[in-house]
Structure formats: structure tokens, C-alpha cells
DNA sequence: ACATAATTTAATGCATACGCAAATAAATGC
DNA sequence: GCATTTATTTGCGTATGCATTAAATTATGT
């Protein structure tokens, strides 16, 4: 078997991430290093390293003597993040279109789109969100820019927790998949400009929906 | 006086950065944690923290038992980074134009442009690079997206060392400032699309010059 | 009673120590 | 002489303890 004995700091990163996404460590809450250490049943050292890493990824903030604060996201933060995603994924879509991928290369992307259809048919929002993540991650991968992959990954993480909430507040994203298919087709046909602009519009649309939703519900922070 | 006693890990980050940019820690070189610790005259703990931070910023890489490697940049890396800068600064320029800044708000930006002119007149490339940095940093600041500021800062750091080399290999960037002024004017006049596209072209032009320069000189890594 | 100073508390930043695992060198077998 | 095994070294990951310093609390003077 491939039993991978991962180090304590790796485990700390992983477990803290999970607990942040699940909401067990809720946005805005403060936690002492020693508290997290005993929670994860390890010493402060690996926790500290994990916390530094997660800070650089924008998930939390170190406030000396106050503890580690899980960063809340305001509507403005969401807008910022979606703007970054719009630009970088837009470029990725363009580059993917220019790469001249064949059907086989795009099979995974197509699969994610199909999965989203299925999830919508089954009204399974978690499955939809999962497939949506795969679509966006794969799109960026096809763009072949490792920096963009990293940045988009970080930004996606930051909105993951907040999206959980908003996902259940809005109607089923049935129209969303039309956009995805348009992006797919543009990439498949090498229409770079079309791929970029279609995806841009898609993301900007998502941004406005979410930001308005948050503001309408007076959710100052998530 | 404002003597700010900064912590050892802060100092480690700062000093390591300086030594990376100066080339004292050259690209591709490996260094043991203990080696860096004695270099900075502190224990391994703060260097370790600094090294983790710098790794997340893309300046170096941790290779267990091999030491920390100062990351070299290939022409492809430069292309990746410039693509990211193009997109995000382009958006920043657009947003800055939409913000409706007055002359006072843009004074710092104008100052940087003037400094570049002076530097070129004096053939002072270091001063030019410095003013160019200020221009780009200020542009991004005016775009009012803290994530973009952070990312652009990181990407600029990554190319800083490499740019030192290329700067002295190419002709004086006299034309460059025409672009800067066009961007300035577009922002000043609220011409969002113009601001974005002018700046995009500017960055893409810089990208092609540098990448071709590196390839022509067969510089595989910097 | 209020403001300020002194004292205590407690969380962090850092140094140090140690065990493990990987890399290297030495030794043994064929 | 080469390969394989065993010993040795060495760098890293983690734990732990202490020093530092910011915050909280109490004390003191007006």
C-alpha cells in the first residue's frame, strides 16, 4: 500500500484547513497556538509552522498575544477575490484555447461539466460544488501557468467556506453550465478571444450574484 | 527616535531577501538551515520560519536534506510571471481609471514617471529601476485591490534579481515612459478601457523583450 | 474617584536538545 | 572488482523550556 506517513506540520496544515472549511474553526474566531496544539495533539512547533503557511495563503492572521484569527470575508473581499479569479482564469482559458488541445486532452474538463449536469438533475449542491471546483482547477491547469494555478488555488480556498453559505441561499445554478460548455467549445475550437471573454463574463456574473446576495442579506462577514 | 526592534524572524526574512536580491545568495545555490543560521547569527528556529515564509512567496524552495534552494528563473518562468503581472496590473489600471482620481491623488504616480525621465537623462539605470518599481507599485495601489497588491508584490520580487541582469543587457528604456504617460493620462481622464489596454500592451511588450533577450543569450536560468 | 504607576500574568519568540531517517561511507560477500 | 549490506554521519522535524514583552490587574497618589 502507499501508506504515506506525513509529517506533523503537514498534518497540521491539512487538519486546520479542513476545520476552517467545515466551520469548526469559524470566521473571526481567535485561537491560541497552544490551544490548536492540544486540539491536534502535537507540540506548538508544527502548529506554528502550519499557521505561518496558512497565513501566507490568506486563510488566517497572526495577531501576537491575541491568537490566530480565522479571517472573515466581507462582501468587498469577495469582490476582490472574484476580480482576481476573473482575470487569471480568463487568461488561462485563452491560453488553453491557444494550446490546441484535442478531445482527449479535454476529457477531464468535459467530465466535470457532465458531473455538474448530473448534480443539478439530482439537486445535489455539494456534488455540484465539487464538480465546479474540478472544472475551474482543470481549466487553469490547461492554461499551463504554474503561478496562476497556485494563485487561483489560494483564492478558491479563501472563498470556499463563504461559498458554502451562499450556495444554499441562491437558486440552482442551472444556467451556469451553459457558460461552461461555451468555454469548453471555444477552447476546443481554438477560439482564444471567445474563451477568454466567455469565461470572464461567467465569473463576473457569479461575482455580482454573490456580492449582491451578501449585501441583500446584510451579511457583513462570512 | 523610532528605533524599531524587530524580531529575529523578521530580520531573517529581511536579510535573506536582501542577500537573494543582491546575489550574495545566488540562484540555484543550496544552503543548509544551520548555515543560514550562523550566517545571520541566530538559531535555526527563526531562519526556519523565515525560510517557510520566503518559500510561500516563491523565492526559494525547501528540499529536505539538500538544503534550501534559491529558485532560479527560466525564460518560461519570466513569461509566466509577466503574464500574471499583465493581467492584474491591467485590471488595476482599469479600476484606477474608474475611481475618478484627481491630480493630487495621482501626484505620486506622476512623480515616479518624472523620476524615470530624470534617471534616463542621467543614464542611471538603478534609479530608473527604482522609479519603475514605484510606478508599478503605486498603480496597483490605486487599483484598490489588496489581493492584487500582494500578488503583484510577490511576482515583482521574483523577477527583481533577474531584472538586475537583463536591465544592463538592453538599450535604455526611453520609449517605456511614453507608455507610462499614456497610462497616467487614461487614468486621469477616466478612460478605463484605454488604461487597461495601454498598460497591458506595455507589459506584454516588456515581456517579449526580456524573454527574447534571455533566449538570445542562451540564459537558461537566472 | 480617577488617572497613573507598579506588578503580575500569560502568550509568544527563540534557543536548545534529541531522535529519526536519509545520505554517505565502510565493510563484507560473491 | 562489483554489488550488497552494514555502520556512521548528518540534517531535519519536533518537543521543550526559558526569556521577552504586551496585556491585564492591582496598587498608589492626588
Image: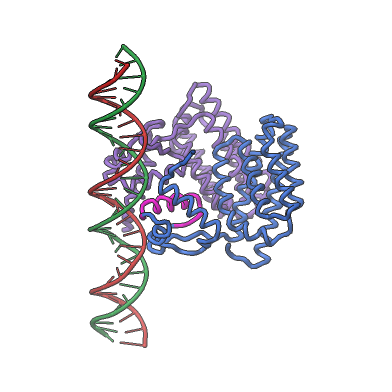
Chain colours: A blue, B purple, C red, D green
Closer to the camera in the image, B151 or A29: A29
> Residue B168, image x and y in percent?
46, 28
Closer to the camera in the image, A105 or C29: C29
Q: Is residue A139 left or right of residue A29?
A: right
Q: Residue at x 32, y 50 (%)?
A: B8
Q: Residue at x 58, y 29 (%)?
A: B208
Is B195 situated above or below A207? above
Is A51 situated above or below A107? below
Kindly tell me whether residue B21 is visible in this rendering.
Answer: no
Q: Is residue B90 left or right of residue B68?
A: right
Q: Residue at x 60, y 45 (%)?
A: B184
> Residue A208, image x and y in percent?
69, 56
Is B36 situated above or below A52? above
Membership of B216 in magenta stretch: no
> Residue A51, image x and y in percent?
43, 53
Span highlighted in magenta in the image: A43-61
Q: Is residue A46 left or right of residue B185?
A: left
| Most common SS among magenta residues | helix
> Residue A213 appears in which quarter of the rendering?
bottom right
Amino acid at each position: 500500500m502507499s501508506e504515506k506517513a506525513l509529517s506533523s506540520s503537514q498534518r497540521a496544515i491539512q487538519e486546520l484547513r479542513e476545520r476552517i472549511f467545515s466551520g469548526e474553526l469559524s470566521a473571526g474566531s481567535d485561537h491560541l497556538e497552544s490551544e490548536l496544539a492540544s486540539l491536534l495533539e502535537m507540540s506548538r512547533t508544527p502548529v506554528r509552522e502550519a499557521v505561518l503557511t496558512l497565513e501566507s495563503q490568506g486563510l488566517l492572521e497572526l495577531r501576537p498575544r491575541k491568537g490566530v484569527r480565522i479571517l472573515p470575508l466581507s462582501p468587498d473581499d469577495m469582490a476582490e477575490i472574484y476580480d482576481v479569479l476573473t482575470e487569471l482564469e480568463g487568461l488561462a482559458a485563452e491560453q488553453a484555447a491557444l494550446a490546441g488541445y484535442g478531445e482527449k486532452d479535454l476529457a477531464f474538463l468535459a467530465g466535470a461539466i457532465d458531473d455538474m449536469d448530473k448534480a443539478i438533475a439530482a439537486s445535489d449542491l455539494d456534488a455540484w460544488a465539487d464538480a465546479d471546483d474540478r472544472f475551474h482547477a482543470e481549466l487553469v491547469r490547461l492554461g499551463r501557468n504554474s503561478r496562476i494555478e497556485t494563485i487561483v488555488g489560494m483564492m478558491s480556498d479563501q472563498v470556499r467556506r463563504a461559498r458554502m453559505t451562499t450556495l444554499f441561499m441562491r437558486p440552482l445554478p442551472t444556467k451556469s453550465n451553459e457558460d461552461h460548455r461555451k468555454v469548453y467549445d471555444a477552447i476546443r475550437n481554438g477560439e482564444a478571444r471567445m474563451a477568454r471573454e466567455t469565461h470572464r463574463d461567467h465569473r463576473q456574473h457569479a461575482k455580482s450574484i454573490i456580492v449582491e446576495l451578501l449585501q441583500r442579506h446584510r451579511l457583513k462577514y462570512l
